[in-house]
Image (cartoon, grey):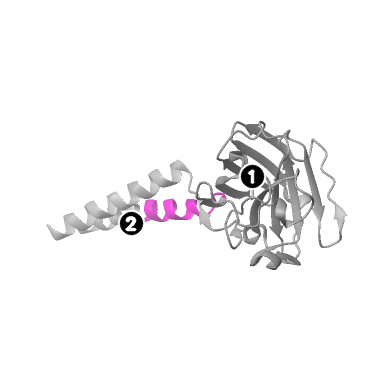
């Protein structure tokens, strides 16, 4: 009887450890939500809902070496033709910031931009050169108030940080305003960068295995107590 119980406990422990180990192989993601109508004080453009960020997420999929960027605005993106959405990345150089408007902790060294028609462009600020973005390299979709970008790591090579450690921020602009920081309507996050590796996203199967392992260990403990 003692041998059977030990074998049962060993099997349950193995299932539990398997469930935990499987979680470490999932995608890495960072997600924030943003307040409605929190346009920054220096914004001089139209307070259009499409320039007001409600949620922003950045996921790095190590299996495909791709960043998945998703944002939801407070209104329809395509309906405001002068809207532009700038995603800043800190890959390790972090040679630009917004200290001029009181936000020194929003740091970046490359930007990818999306306009309200879906056109995408990019600039490497460490070299001052455009980032070539053929259609086959970066995919984008705009669906109402939400846009999504898939960006290969090759487009944004590391300058010292691992992809899971990149800092990311989103700032919508109104390009009807003369060039400058007065174009910027909102930041997400508001005062710092989102770290891509802020949270792990377990697959459903991993969660099921973890729950089963915990449940099994609970039963084993109860049987010992009885």
Percent x, y of residue 171: 66, 51
Residue 136 within the segment the image draws in magenta: no
Which mark, residue 68? 1
Proximity of marks 1 and 2: CB atoms separated by less than 8 Å: no
Name the element at disc 2: helix
Q: Earlier in the sequence, mark 1 or mark 2?
A: 2
Q: Nearer the viewer, mark 1 or mark 2?
A: 1
Q: Is residue 208 left or right of residue 181?
A: left
What main secondary structure does the magenta stretch of the protein show?
A: helix
Which mark, residue 43? none
Name the residue: 54% across, 58% down: 198
Name the residue: 81% across, 56% down: 124
Disc 1 crowd rating (10 Å Cα; few below 14, some 14-19, many 20+) is some
Q: Is residue 2 above or below residue 77?
A: below
Give whichever of 184, 46 is nearer the camera: 46
Percent x, y of residue 102: 64, 67
Name the residue: 63% across, 61% down: 165
Name the element at disc 1: strand
Asked whether the viewer can see residue 1, the reply is no
Asked whether the viewer can see residue 189, the reply is yes
Which mark, residue 10? 2
- Magenta region: 13-27
Residue 23 within the segment the image draws in magenta: yes
Where, quadrant-wise, is the N terminus in this rendering?
bottom left
Disc 2 crowd rating (10 Å Cα; few below 14, some 14-19, many 20+) is few
Q: Is residue 134 left or right of residue 212?
A: right
């Amino acid at each position: 009887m003692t041998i059977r119980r030990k074998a049962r406990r060993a099997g349950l422990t193995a299932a539990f450890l398997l469930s935990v180990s499987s979680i470490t192989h999932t995608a890495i993601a960072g997600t924030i939500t943003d307040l409605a109508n929190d346009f920054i004080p220096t914004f001089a453009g139209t307070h259009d809902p499409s320039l007001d960020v409600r949620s922003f997420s950045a996921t790095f999929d190590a299996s495909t070496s791709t960043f998945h960027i998703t944002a939801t605005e407070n209104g329809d993106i395509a309906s405001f033709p002068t809207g532009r959405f700038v995603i800043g990345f800190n890959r390790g150089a972090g040679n630009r910031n917004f200290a001029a408007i009181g936000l020194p902790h929003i740091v970046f060294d490359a930007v990818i931009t999306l306009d309200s028609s879906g056109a995408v462009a990019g600039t490497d600020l460490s070299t001052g050169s455009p980032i070539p973005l053929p259609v086959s390299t970066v995919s984008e979709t705009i669906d109402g108030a939400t846009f999504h970008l898939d960006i290969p790591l090759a487009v944004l090579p590391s300058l010292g940080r691992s992809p899971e450690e990149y800092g990311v921020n989103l700032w919508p602009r109104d390009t009807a305003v003369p060039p400058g920081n007065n174009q910027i309507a909102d930041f997400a996050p508001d005062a710092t960068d989102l770290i891509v590796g802020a949270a792990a996203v377990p697959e459903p199967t991993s969660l099921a295995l973890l729950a089963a392992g915990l449940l099994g260990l609970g039963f084993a403990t109860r049987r010992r107590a009885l």
